[in-house]
Image (spheres, helix red, strand yellow):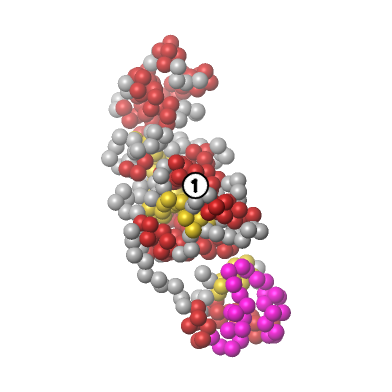
Amino acid sequence: MPEKEYLYFLCQIPGIGAISIFRLREFFGGFREIWNAEERFLRKANILTERRLSKLLEGRKQESAFQREYEALEGRGIRFTAYWEEAYPQRLRPYRDRPAALYLKGAFPKDGLPSVAIVGARGCTEYGKEAAGFFASSLAKENVQIISGLALGVDGAAHRGALAAGGRTFAVLGCGINVCYPKENYGLFCEMEEKGGIMTEFPLGTRPSSMNFPMRNRIISALADAVIIIEAREKSGSLITADYALEQGKEVFALPGRITDPLSGGCNRLLQTGAAVLLSPSDVLDFLGLKYEKKLTDYKNTEKRLAKNENLVYSFLDSRPKHFDAIVSACGLSMAECMESLFRLELAGIVNKTGNQYYSRKM
């Protein structure tokens, strides 16, 4: 039986992570030897806790089931890639805590292309979603690969922005490769199999758990040349990703926000401690050594082309969503006139309807 299969068996044992696997291999010389080692020698190695040792001994009884599962992976469109294989991402190789193997649907990010991770709050604002989509789209148009975690909020917006621009985007999961979490992103999950990739170090069927996400964050940052943080509270998983990025020697960019906004607390704190300010895609592209052609709508010229009522409504809007009633009150137009103007501004692609009767300027 090939070494890779024995590695697969070891990866199914709860609590035995990458560092333990590498230490065991160094002690025993191979994965076959680890799997077949007598209990007394496993104890002599003094690598596994009593609980993990018990899990390993119990797991050996399921070898036949593990082997059947391994042999069925290809038929399910899943690749199991070991750390020594050529397909394993080069960006992960330098790190001691790199995954011993990765489960993959789709493709890995290409080693020769620049990659940027975009992460942030799950419960982000509409502005946060728009910013994530904007930066992901702008970078993807310049052939930058977008990495994130497929979570609600900023992550999902970043993936969608990259796909909308015809780019490639990749997700690192905190659960099994056959588990879509959250369920709301199932359509995105399926699309990314075809136009990017989805990967995880967790065995099939692993449910999402709070302890899994910090582990997956080290992979997100390691796969990226730079990490962008968009909307994060002072204590959030996004800041864990930023910490990993800094430990790995990666550049961290943070989107500044209002000091009164809790969702900007984490980003503002990062900026205070030395993170790079994110104001434009060119900030990131300059760091990557790429040129950026500004393709944003020139709003000043746009305003000149707007009809009187539309210009009045547009001048009241900004990046923060405003309710229709507030817009009517501020502009002094009738409800019908205001609604018609907003509709025309939406058609022109310069205004977003961000919720139930809420509107904002499009970034």
Q: Residue at x 58, y 69 (%)?
A: 319
Mark 1: secondary structure: helix
The x, y position of residue 28, in whole percent, is 35, 19
- Residue 9 horizontal side relative to residue 86, left or right: right
Residue 85 to residue 131: above or below: above
Residue 194 to residue 332: above or below: above
Most distant residue in the left direction: 86
Residue 276 seen by the camera = yes
Task: From the image, tell me which residue sits under label 1.
Answer: 242
Q: Residue at x 38, y 30 (%)?
A: 8
- Residue 56 horizontal side relative to residue 259, left or right: left
Q: Residue at x 34, y 65 (%)?
A: 291
- 256 or 340: nearer the viewer: 256
Most distant residue in the bottom direction: 308
The x, y position of residue 54, in whole percent, is 50, 19
Is 277 covered by the magenta stretch? no
Q: Amino acid at mark 1?
A: Ala
Count the numbered circles shown. Answer: 1
Which of the 4 quarters of the picture holds residue 200?
top left
Q: Residues within 10 Å of mark 1 (few under 14, many from 20)?
A: many
Q: Residue at x 70, y 75 (%)?
A: 326
Residue 121 seen by the camera = no
Is 330 covered by the magenta stretch? yes
The x, y position of residue 337, in whole percent, is 65, 85
- 82 or 204: nearer the viewer: 82
Magenta residue span = 306-334
The x, y position of residue 283, in whole percent, is 42, 61
